[in-house]
Amino acid sequence: MSDNPVPDQDWEEAEFRARVLAELPEQLTEGDVTRAMRQLDVSRATVYRLARQFREDARTSALLPNTSGRKPGMLPLDPAVEAIVVHHFKGF
């Protein structure tokens, strides 16, 4: 069993994204963006967002897909704490 909470498929996708983005020049041209869009099967805006993420944080993990919901390892609030939060939220 792996200590890594990220599925292998997500890591493979992040590694593929990193390879594609690493080939992009600093100054993106229309052709660069179009080619990356096709390779990654994402929108133009997503190419720019991923390129920015990868330049700011050159780790492959920066390119892992975002998932909604609770992250692995996060625990829900204790019921007593949850009750306090709900009470104050309703009072707000």
Image (spheres, rainbow, N blue to C red):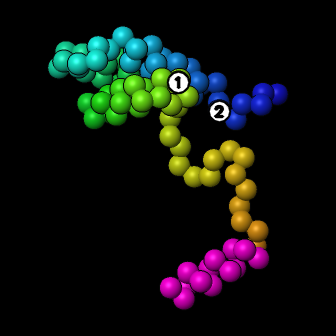
Which residue corresponds to mark 2?
A: 6
Q: Which residues are magenta?
A: 80-92
Residue 89 drawn in magenta:
yes
Could you classify mark 1 by the number of other residues whose Cα lies within 10 Å: few (under 14), some (14-19), or many (20 or more)?
Answer: some
Which kind of residue does numbered mark 2 sit on? Answer: Val
* Residue plotted at (50% across, 31% down): 62
Q: Give the amino acid at mark 1.
A: Arg
Q: Nearer the viewer, residue 56 or 68?
A: 56
Reading the image, the residue beneath label 1 is: 59
Residue 42: tell me if it is visible. no
* 60 on left or right of 54: right
- What SS does tag 1 mark? loop
Label 2 crowd bin: few (<14), some (14–19), many (20+), radius 10 Å? some
> Residue 52 sits in which quadrant?
top left
2 or 1: tag closer to the N-terminus: 2
- Residue 70 highlighted magenta (yes or no): no
Residue 66: x %, y % from top left:
50, 40
Tell me which corner region of the image, top left, top right, bottom left or bottom right, holds residue 49.
Answer: top left
Which residue is the extreme one toward the front? 56
Circle nearer the viewer, 2 or 1: 1
Q: Is residue 72 left or right of residue 29?
A: right
Q: Quadrant of residue 39?
A: top left
